[in-house]
Amino acid sequence: MLSKKVILSSIASLGFFFSLASGEAVAQTTSEIPSNEKSQMTAFRPIEQPLWLKGAVTSAGLVLIGLEIWWFLLSKPKSQKAEAHHGIQEVSITVDGGYEPSRVVVNALQPVRLNFLRRDPSSCLEQVVFPDFHIAQELDLNQVTTVEFTPEKPGQYTFACGMNMFRGVVEVKTPHTNSM
């Protein structure tokens, strides 16, 4: 994965390049245009802008690009390993504008209990769907709803809201066995 310094320096270089390129653009003056074409071009006139304004717009654009890169490439979803209680792996997930944690790590061949606490009143998050386990569960507002299943094979299994807009992952790993 690219380092933050490489990404930020690339963005800064692009911004510097575009600010130089925009300063070198030359528009034709009305004296260089034939008179029959002048009437067609009177609606468009070049607008001179101060250098500080060009710099501010370029800086704002670079900040927005940097935020998008961070959001989509550098921010990692929070994961949580399930804790075993009486032979059942258990994790609590808060549903509030998404799933927190959005990645849950469990062991295969052991029962899993996911406790969903829905705090978001939006209709999208009224339901959680586990397509690989054929589970669709309604989530009541401000109440804990339990979803239980037993994953048989290691892998990554997605879960999502009823509209498939918010997603999470259950990562199933091979259980570690101690052989003596």
Image: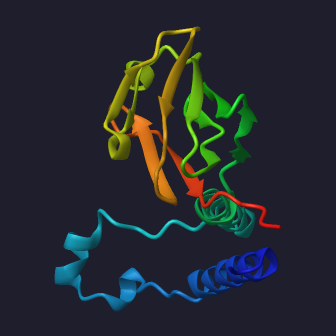
The residue under the point 58% across, 30% down is 113
Q: Is residue 38 visible?
A: yes
Q: How is the image coloured?
A: rainbow
- The quadrant in which residue 73 appears is bottom right
Task: Tell me: residue 5, above or below residue 56.
Answer: below
Please, which residue is most extreme toward the front here? 180
Q: Is residue 96 visible?
A: no
Q: How many marks?
A: 0
Q: Is residue 69 left or right of residue 170?
A: right
The image shows residue 92 at horizontal and vertical percentages of 67, 28
The image shows residue 96 at horizontal and vertical percentages of 59, 25
Task: Tell me: residue 152, above or below residue 117.
Answer: below
The image shows residue 116 at horizontal and vertical percentages of 57, 23
- The quadrant in which residue 134 appears is top left
Task: Tell me: residue 102, above or below residue 90.
Answer: below
Which residue is at the front of the view, 92 or 66? 92
Q: Is residue 42 left or right of residue 147?
A: left
Q: Is residue 45 left or right of residue 81?
A: left
